[in-house]
Image: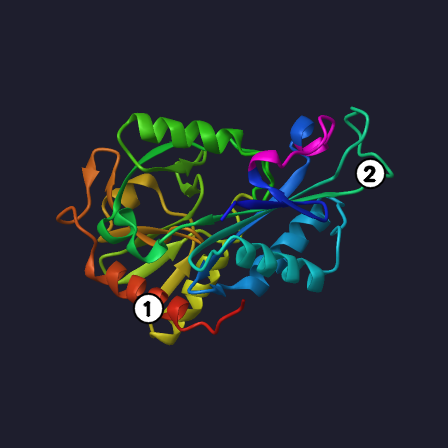
């Protein structure tokens, strides 16, 4: 089966998919994106993902190029045409094509691109065994609540982590507190069994998986608090983990040179992970 992409109303071979050279997403990173996960043909947390997409677009004064109902139909059709039962769909919307000028054009038509990828999320080794992370200064702009395609600082930090033998980087603000990961939200578990994660202000992304996990934690009668925590708090924590649509609940077993616990996923994190897996596999089919 040939892999297809969707570009502005057309299903096209993935290798041939392209946008105009003066698309503002290409020239200015003037656009947003969203990623949704599909498990056994069910799109997980589709409504909050699309809510966040629309919010990001609104913050940048970009119009949704089609109705939300049509957008959902195209997403499901692209997944079906590509035979994706377990995987992800990537959505990118830019302001569109216009003569190069820093100011927003008044008449550009937004560009809509979608691609899919098969991934066996529930059996990923890093999710089951845990990951090593590094900490690095947060060099991003002050509107990280917008899921912008401008990800160069994230790419630099992720590359630094890979070169150091790690899997991810947690970003640290000027006060020495962790903001989030390059592509995930950061959590720790204190020695009195309290979940800590940073509040969703303008300096971090409002993670959809983060919000779902908070709801599940409340159902489990677990205590959690939204506040900044320092790198030293993280290194001395009982456990740590990260969350995102594609990393689910991923245990963190080492931060910089500090091994957490016995270097294996902790019982608290594993309990949350099992509950989130259960939540995903019990979702009704969306395709």
For the C terminus, the quadrant is bottom right
Q: Nearer the viewer, residue 9 or 204?
A: 9
Residues under labels 2 and 1: Cα distance?
45 Å
Residue 275 badge = 1
- Tell me, yes or no, whether the highlighted magenta stretch contains residue 20: yes
From where the camera sits, is residue 121 visible? yes
Q: Tell me residue 105's x, y (percent).
A: 83, 34
Q: Check disc 2 and report the residue beneath it.
A: 108
Image point (39%, 72%), residue name:
218
- Density class for disc 2 (Cα within 10 Å; few <14, some 14-19, many ≥20) is some
Q: Tell me residue 72's x, y (percent).
A: 64, 61
Q: Quadrant of residue 120?
A: bottom left
Among the two numbered marks 2 and 1 on one chain, the one whose residue lies closer to the N terminus? 2
- Specify whether 103 is left or right of 82: right
Number of numbered labels in the structure image:
2
- Density class for disc 1 (Cα within 10 Å; few <14, some 14-19, many ≥20) is some
Residue 123 badge = none
From where the camera sits, is residue 202 visible? no
Q: Nearer the viewer, residue 246 or 196?
A: 246
Q: Nearer the viewer, residue 6 or 60?
A: 6
Q: Which residues are magenta?
A: 15-25
Please tell me whether the stretch drawn in magenta is mainly helix, strand or loop. loop
- Specify whether 58 is left or right of 276: right
- Tell me, yes or no, whether the highlighted magenta stretch contains residue 240: no
Look at discs 2 and 1 and give the one toward the viewer. 2
Q: Secondary structure at mark 1?
A: helix
């Amino acid at each position: 089966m040939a892999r297809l992409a969707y570009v502005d109303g057309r299903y096209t071979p993935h290798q041939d998919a392209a946008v105009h050279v003066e698309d503002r997403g290409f020239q200015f990173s003037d656009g947003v994106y969203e990623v949704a996960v599909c498990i056994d043909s069910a799109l997980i947390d589709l409504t909050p993902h699309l809510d966040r997409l629309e919010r990001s677009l609104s913050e940048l004064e970009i119009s949704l190029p089609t109705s939300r109902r049509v957008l959902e139909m195209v997403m499901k059709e692209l997944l079906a045409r590509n035979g994706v039962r377990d995987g992800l769909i990537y959505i990118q919307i830019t302001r569109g094509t216009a003569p190069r000028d820093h100011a927003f054009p008044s008449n550009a038509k937004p560009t809509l691109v979608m691609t899919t990828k098969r991934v066996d999320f529930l059996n990923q080794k890093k999710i089951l065994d845990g990951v090593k992370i590094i900490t690095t200064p947060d060099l991003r702009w002050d509107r990280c609540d917008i899921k912008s395609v401008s990800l160069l600082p994230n790419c630099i930090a992720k590359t630094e982590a890979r070169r150091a033998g790690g899997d991810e980087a947690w970003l640290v603000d000027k006060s020495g507190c962790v903001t989030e990961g390059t592509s995930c939200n950061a959590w720790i578990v204190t020695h009195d069994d309290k979940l800590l994660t940073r509040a969703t202000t303008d300096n971090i992304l409002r993670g959809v998986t983060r919000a779902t996990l908070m709801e599940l934690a409340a159902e489990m009668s677990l205590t959690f608090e939204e506040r900044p925590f320092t790198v030293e708090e993280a290194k001395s924590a009982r456990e740590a983990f990260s969350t995102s649509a594609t990393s689910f609940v991923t245990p963190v077993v080492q931060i910089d040179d500090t091994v957490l616990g016995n270097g294996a996923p902790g019982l608290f994190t594993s309990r949350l992970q099992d509950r989130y897996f259960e939540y995903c596999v019990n979702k009704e089919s969306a395709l």
